[in-house]
Amino acid sequence: MVDRDDAAAHRLLHALANRRSFALKDITSDPVDRGAIAQLLEAANWAPSHGKTEPWRFVVYSGAARQGLSDAFGAAFRTLNTAQPVGSAGELAQSQRVWQAPVWIALGMQPSQKMPEWEDLIAFGSAVQNMHLMASALGLASKWTSGAVVLHPSVATAVGFAPDTKLYGFFYVGHPAIAWPAGQRRPVAAKVRWVDDHADV
Ligand SMILES: Cc1cc2nc3c(=O)[nH]c(=O)nc-3n(C[C@H](O)[C@H](O)[C@H](O)COP(=O)(O)O)c2cc1C
């Protein structure tokens, strides 16, 4: 049992509201230290999972090792765009992305076969959210990026995921090149219906 701590709750809400996604153009190329990335991974590992399945799987790329990802993104683009010539602007854009953030983490979900897959998937999403919260708390600029190229099965193979592990994109991390952006949400009241006597809330 943890005692009620209003100050901690206030800080938590602040951390939740200040978790922010950054475009690649808003990230510097300065490296991120390994200890910070280890903190992100530790935070992710504290996500809940029904049946303790812990289905999240990660592969961390940094430095020159990003070349493997660059090649994988370029190859996936070519597979998806056979009408375009080799070395097209689109292919180059995909293969160059990896150099715009110093760390790229492949996000995988290995279904447990023990619980319904949707439960494992939600647990996995919670792990990525934890990772993102820790990144923002450390002042790091990051984003979950998906899309046809990075999700392509050939990319999952290239990062070395087991055949049953599904790739759900990448989480890139770096240092912000801009002032920390403000978040925006539509009011929660529009998404909630109270069926008790809390109508004044
Ligand atoms: C599963 C998932 C996939 C996402 N994929 C992309 C993406 O491919 N490109 C992108 O610009 N943002 C992507 N985002 C980030 C959202 O655009 C972002 O969370 C949203 O704009 C709210 O901004 P915030 O994270 O700063 O609160 C993704 C977010 C989630 C949860």
Image: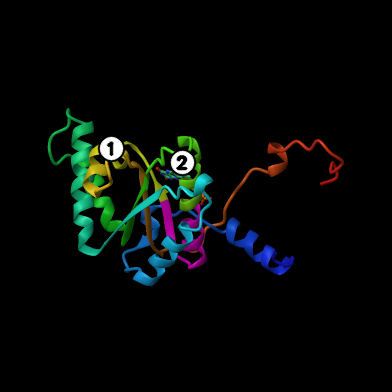
**Where residue 138 sits: x, y (%)?**
48, 68
Residue type, mark 1 in image: His
The stretch of residues the image draws in magenta is 129-143
Where does label 1 land, which residue?
A: 152
Q: Which residue is mark 2?
A: 121
Kindly identify the residue that appears in the image at 38 percent across and 71 percent down. Answer: 35
Mark 2 crowdedness (10 Å alpha carbons): few <14, some 14-19, many ≥20: many
Percent of width and height locating residue 50: 53, 45
The one nearer the camera, 12 or 190, is 12
Residue labelled 2 has its Cβ within 8 Å of some atom of ligand 1: no
Which residue is at the front of the view, 66 or 24? Answer: 66
Residue 34 image-quadrant placement? bottom left
Residue 75 appears in the rendering: yes
Q: How many marks?
A: 2
Determine whether 6 is above or below 163 in the image: below
Residue 33 placement, left or right of 178: left
Please identify the residue farthest to the top as the structure is shown: 83
The three-letter code of the residue at mark 2 reads Leu
Q: Which mark is residue 57?
A: none
The percent position of residue 58, horizontal first and vertical second, equals: 35, 53
- Where residue 77 sits, quadrant-wise, is top left
